[in-house]
Image (spheres, helix red, strand yellow):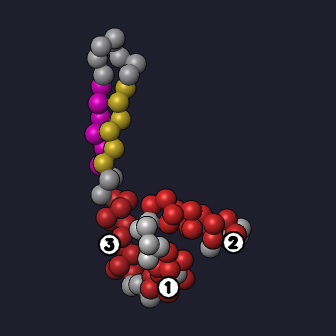
Amino acid sequence: MESAKGDTFSSTIISDVLYGKEDGSELLASMDEIRYYGEIRNWTSAQWVDLLRKFVYSLSLVVRNFNDKPGTTSTLHVSL
């Protein structure tokens, strides 16, 4: 939860104006964050592990070394 609640409120409205439907029909759902917290509060350990596997552990990184000879690069692929 945000400590500056006014900023959170205005940010949600501004985002809806910029990116939401023109009729404002998505505004109510975007303002109802507490419902989402209620849903995830009841998640099992398995659901949290699945979330971590999907968004954290399954990521791959590519590290490039540009300090090699001019015109060449070394690439290292790392899976987390």
Query: Decide: marks 3, 2 in contact (CB < 8 A)?
Result: no
Q: Residue at x 33, y 12 (%)?
A: 69
At label 1, counting other C-alpha atoms closer than 10 Å, the crowd grade (few under 14, some 14-19, many 20 or more) is few
Q: State which region is magenta.
A: 74-79
Q: Residue at x 50, y 85 (%)?
A: 35
Residue receiving disc 2: 5
Residue receiving disc 3: 50
Query: Decide: marks 1, 3 in contact (CB < 8 A)?
Result: no
Secondary structure mostly taken by the magenta-highlighted segment of the chain: strand
Q: Residue at x 44, y 77 (%)?
A: 25
**Residue depth check, mark 1 versus mark 3: number of the one nearer the observer:** 1
User: Which label number is shown at residue 35?
Assistant: 1
Question: Is residue 76 located in the magenta-colored stretch of the structure?
Answer: yes
Amino acid type assigned to the residue bearing label 1 in the image: Arg
Horizontal side, residue 67 vs residue 12: left or right: left
1 or 2: tag closer to the N-terminus: 2
